[in-house]
Amino acid sequence: MNTTTATEEEMKKCSVDEVTCGKCGVFPISVVGQRVINGADASRGEFPYHVMLQTRVKKDKYTCGGSIIHAQWVLSAAHCFIWQSDGKVVRVSEVVVGGGSIYADKLDKLTVDTVITHPDFKDVAMGDDIALVKLSEKIDFNSNRHLQPICLGEEGDTPLADKAVATGWGRLVPKGGSVYPNKLQEVSLGLIPANKCKGVSLPKNKSKVVCAMTPYKDTCQGDSGGPLVAQIDDGRWTQVGITSYGYGCARPDTPGVYVRVAHYLPWIEEITGICAC
């Protein structure tokens, strides 16, 4: 049995990053369409926290999404970095590509120092599909308006039965071809509490996830790890979910499953040492 003394608990207390907290979540997000699948092109500066993660397994390259949550930390999904065929093989993250532009081929490149996946992650449907990526250098938010942090959703920030916005450079068609955009996509989705989420397998502890569904609109392959954000009472945008899994894409009666950020705030704070804003 692992035991932790009070002194150790005190040592693990996080600190508030005033720069991050002062800048997070203040964005002109306005979803004008309802492709991501059947969404719309994002506008410049609309999602400055969204980044593209490029990974490699042997000669094969993969793409996931992520979100800037601090000057040196990006939040993403564990399955973007762990290959689960014939045992676990950690994918090597090449670069984090971030919002110098909304066009995928004209983005700034940020180098990666460390990738930390949740220690309990085994399979997406079991939960814990969350990872933290530490950048080699800190982002200067003051000198680059196209790179800004997103706030992290706390308990009570998920406006159930309301809308959230997902973003990504993932596949644009649900099946029959690999069509990917050159421009970041956005889509508005209806949130569903996990206890009312039907048609997909969920973790035993349903507080680990939140579901989202709007018929014929969805995230898809290549969007994994990307942020699901919602606007809270003070007008700021906060990340309530991480794109994790689903069955197919954009099926009219099948929701997508997202890691519920609020459940993992203690883990995020322990790894980064930074309190959620």
Image (cartoon, grey):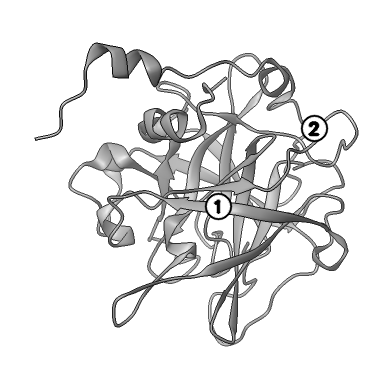
Q: Which mark is residue 167?
A: none
Residue under circle 2? 28
x then y, percent, for residue 81: 48, 64
x then y, percent, for residue 221: 54, 70
The number of callouts visible is 2
Along the polypeptide, which appears first: circle 1 or circle 2? 2
x then y, percent, for residue 96: 69, 57
Going by the image, does 78 lie left or right of 126? Answer: right
Neighbour tally class for label 1: few under 14, some 14-19, many 20 plus, Cα within 10 Å = some
Residue under circle 1? 114
- Give SS at disc 1: strand
Quadrant showing the N terminus: top left
Residue at left 84%, top 68%?
Answer: 105
Name the residue furthest right: 143
x then y, percent, for residue 244: 44, 56
Can you see residue 77?
Answer: yes
Residue at left 34%, top 38%?
Answer: 193
Residue 194 vs 117, above or below: the answer is above
Residue 23 vs 168, above or below: the answer is above
For badge 2, the amino acid type reads Pro
